[in-house]
Image (cartoon, rainbow, N blue to C red):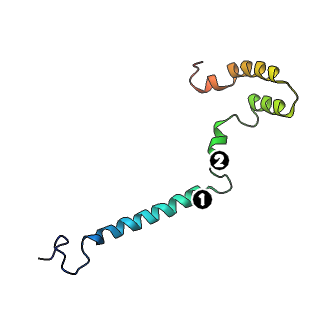
């Protein structure tokens, strides 16, 4: 009886690796496509941007005012501490301060 363990000129046990190689190639192509083409114009950085404050939130507006120079650093931190109590990160993690 001819088996893969007793190789006499046949394909041998290495033939079992070919499906694994093709699976790795397909997985690699799908991964590359998911990270680039299928995400469209959003890009991989979009997930991080969604985690922060939205463009219309009071914290985001305060950050824009500070960046444009409308308020100084002391004013920014004072207002941010008040906004954090009402709208910010403390409410996002279950109310724990």
Mark identifier at residue 38: 1
Location of residue 37 in the rendering, given as x and y in whole percent from the top left corner: 61, 61
Classify 10 Å Cα crowding around label 1: few (below 14), some (14-19), many (20 and above).
few
At mark 1, the secondary structure is helix
Q: Which mark is residue 95?
A: none
Q: Which residue is mark 2?
A: 45
46 w.r.t. 20: above or below:
above
The image shows residue 94 at horizontal and vertical percentages of 56, 23
Whether pointer 1 and pointer 2 mark residues with C-beta atoms closer than 8 Å, the reply is no
Up/down of 28 relative to 14, above or below = above
Quick one: quadrant of the C terminus? top right
Is residue 82 placed above or below 56 in the rendered structure?
A: above
The structure residue drawn at horizontal position 62% and vertical position 22%, both measured from the top left corner, is 90
Task: Tell me the quadrant of the picture where the N terminus can be found.
Answer: bottom left
Count neighbours of disc 2 (C-alpha within 10 A) and say few if under 14, some if 14 to 19, many if 20 or more. few
Q: Residue at x 69, y 24 (%)?
A: 87
The residue furthest right is: 70
For the residue pair 27 and 72, the one nearer the viewer reads as 72
Seen as rendered, the residue at the extreme left is: 1
| Residue 91 picture location, percent across and down | 62, 23
Which residue shows up at 82% across the image and 29% down it?
A: 66
Residue 82 lies in quadrant = top right
Nearer the observer, 14 or 70: 14
Q: Secondary structure at mark 2?
A: loop
Q: Is residue 18 above or below residue 96?
A: below
User: How far from the left and from the top, in percent, is residue 26?
Assistant: 46, 65
Q: Is residue 11 left or right of residue 70?
A: left
Mark nearer the viewer, 1 or 2: 2
Q: CA distance from mark 1 to mark 2?
A: 14 Å
Image point (59%, 20%), residue name: 95
Earlier-in-chain disc, 1 versus 2? 1
Relative placement, left or right, of 32 versus 3 is right
């Amino acid at each position: 009886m001819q088996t893969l363990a007793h190789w006499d000129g046949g394909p041998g046990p290495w033939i079992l690796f070919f499906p694994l190689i093709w699976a790795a190639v397909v997985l690699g192509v799908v991964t590359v496509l998911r990270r680039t083409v299928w995400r469209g114009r959003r890009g991989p950085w979009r997930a991080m941007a969604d985690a922060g404050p939205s463009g219309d939130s009071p914290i985001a507006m305060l950050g824009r005012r500070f960046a444009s120079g409308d308020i100084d650093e002391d004013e920014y931190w004072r207002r941010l501490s008040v906004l954090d109590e009402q709208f910010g990160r403390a409410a996002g993690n279950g109310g724990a301060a």
